[in-house]
Amino acid sequence: DGIKIDNKKLPRSIRKDIQKKVDEKNDEQFAAVRSFLDKKMLEEHYLSIGSGTVEKPNAVQHSVPAWLIFGMFFIMIPLSNVMALERQTNTITRLRLARASASGLIAAKLVPYFLINQLQFVGMLLLGRYLLPEIGVPALILNGSLVPYALLSAAVSAAALGYALLISVCAKSTEHAVVLGGGGIILMAAIGGIMVPAHVMPETMQQLTWISPMAWGLKAFQELLLNRSGLDGIGHYLLLLSAFSCATLTAAVLVYRRQLQTQIRF
């Protein structure tokens, strides 16, 4: 109320008491400011389509499915060796004389390789779940039911076998198959986001990934692992992989049937 007090005229004990209270009040205010400044200004929350908040995505969720799909397509190498050896040793003549059908012979070749692909699928998932955490990276955790993963594995394997068989029956030698098929696999992997994640590519390249069957399988994996979608979320990817498999297998059967009729020697 306009009253002025000269601190110097106050007793020493009162001045000390006032200074102590001022210092305590300043400390409280500074502590409140420091506490506010130490708080995170932004907080990250990751959401999925299927189940709301999820943990932060990690590199394992991309790399393990990506290289699993890449490895499945490389089943072309042993399959092409078998087909080339069949022609070089004239086994194709004996098969023709035994009146074996082209579709039956192809089925006999594809079933073992299909089972090998499934073992490879399981092995890679177990590696991601139990071995990778031992070297300090996050474990690969499968979300939801295992049924969509099993169907996706079968679809990717069928697409890989269709491509492998078509290259094998068209190639004239093992070397030809390796150059033609291996080059195609690497190209599909590069375009399909296997080697470099699609989301870091330019927009044009992201659209280009849709021409690669590997991209269909990888996108389906990401739907299951990141978005936690069920079977409905990957249905169109399964259809694409199945259509690719049917087209390549049909073409391979037609070519192989013609070879049985024309490439026999007595």
Image: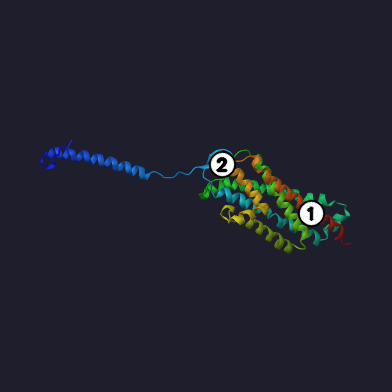
Query: Is 212 left or right of 57, judged from the image as shown?
Result: right
- Work out how far the residue at label 1 is from the one at label 2, CA to CA, in angstroms: 40 Å
Q: Sequence-wise, which precedes: disc 1 or disc 2?
A: 2
Dots 1 and 2: beta carbons under 8 Å?
no
| Quadrant in the picture for the N terminus | top left
Q: Quadrant of residue 146?
A: top right
The dot on residue 48 is 2
Q: Secondary structure at mark 2?
A: strand
Q: Secondary structure at mark 1?
A: helix
Q: Residue at x 28, y 40 (%)?
A: 28
Query: Is 226 left or right of 76, judged from the image as shown?
Result: left
- Circle 2 crowding by C-alpha within 10 Å: few under 14, some 14–19, many from 20: some
- Circle 1 crowding by C-alpha within 10 Å: few under 14, some 14–19, many from 20: some
Amino acid type at mark 1: Ala
From the viewer's perspective, is the residue at label 1 or at label 2 nearer? Answer: 2
Q: Residue at x 71, y 59 (%)?
A: 181
The dot on residue 20 is none
Residue at the top extreme?
1
Q: Position of residue 236 (x, y in %)?
A: 68, 45
The colour scheme of the drawn protein is rainbow
Does residue 115 show up? no
Q: Position of residue 23 (x, y in %)?
A: 23, 41
Identify the residue under disc 1.
251
Q: Residue at x 85, y 51 (%)?
A: 101
Q: Position of residue 133 (x, y in %)?
A: 53, 47
Q: Position of residue 25 (x, y in %)?
A: 25, 39
In the displayed structure, 86 sits above or below 220; it is below
Q: Residue at x 33, y 44 (%)?
A: 34
